[in-house]
Amino acid sequence: MRLLVVTAVGREADACRSVPGAKVVTSGVGRTNAAIATTRAILEDGPFDALVSAGVAGSLPGSDLSIGDIVIASSSIYFEEGLLAPDGFHDLTSMGFPLGDFEGNAVPGNPGLLEQVGPLGRHGPIATVGTCSGTDSAAEAVVGRTGAIAEAMEGAAVLHAGSAFGVPGLEVRAISNSTGDRDRQQWDLALGVRALENVFSRLGQILGSA
């Protein structure tokens, strides 16, 4: 299996290089950078059999996730795209402007890949945010709107770009911090990166034999 791995920063990329034959790309932070880098890699270095959006993430309230835990995204959910009205949030599909060939704002992980890597971590939605949650109210808003257990800044855009070219995708994250009020957040970036490196050594064994 020829795999494309898209990360935001170099430290994440270095943790993901154990998959034999994988192309590992450092996109820069955020959805736009991630979509550009994914598209460019597919056009310039493809074809690829699959892609993974990889990196660290923040745990969200109620998730019971700890730093170093691995999350495999059942779906990667755009948090901001839509309309915030007096009666609540409306995603673009409900407004008649679907983002893609998926329901609402949730870009699904590929079922076949989810099954292959299932034992490697906890499955659940990951929110793709433009603004990280540095207050309790912000973190609770992400959970309320998306039902996500973790948040990061690139996953939905990577999977979305890949789907436009028919490349099945998945988001894999290691928890490096909590979210909520900034002065009470817990952080261990080094532990998160080590956990990412460990899961990718195992992921390489699984996908390398596929």
Image (spheres, rainbow, N blue to C red):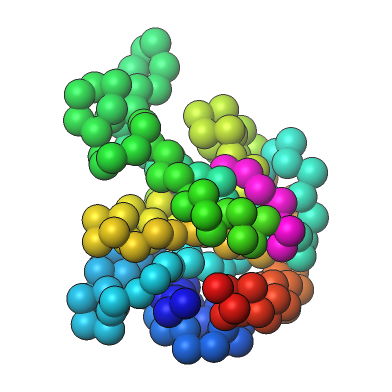
Say if residue 205 shows up in the picture: yes
- Spot occupied by residue 113 in the image (x, y as percentages of width and height): 54, 59
Segment tinted magenta in the rendering: 119-129
| Magenta stretch prevailing secondary structure | strand
Q: Residue at x 73, y 41 (%)?
A: 63
The C terminus sits in image quarter: bottom right
Say if residue 24 shows up in the picture: no
Q: Residue at x 51, y 49 (%)?
A: 111
Q: Residue at x 22, y 82 (%)?
A: 44
- Spot occupied by residue 144 in the image (x, y as percentages of width and height): 56, 28
- Spot occupied by residue 153 in the image (x, y as percentages of width and height): 46, 57
- Spot occupied by residue 187 in the image (x, y as percentages of width and height): 73, 64
Relative to 184, say whether 117 is above or below. below
- Specify whether residue 125 is painted magenta: yes
Q: Nearer the viewer, residue 48 or 72?
A: 48
Which residue is the extreme one toward the top? 87
For the image, the number of numbered tags is 0
Which residue is the extreme one toward the front? 210
Give the left or right position of residue 119, taking residue 203 as reference.
Answer: right
Q: Nearer the viewer, residue 70 or 59?
A: 70
Give the left or right position of residue 147, taking residue 154 as reference.
Answer: right
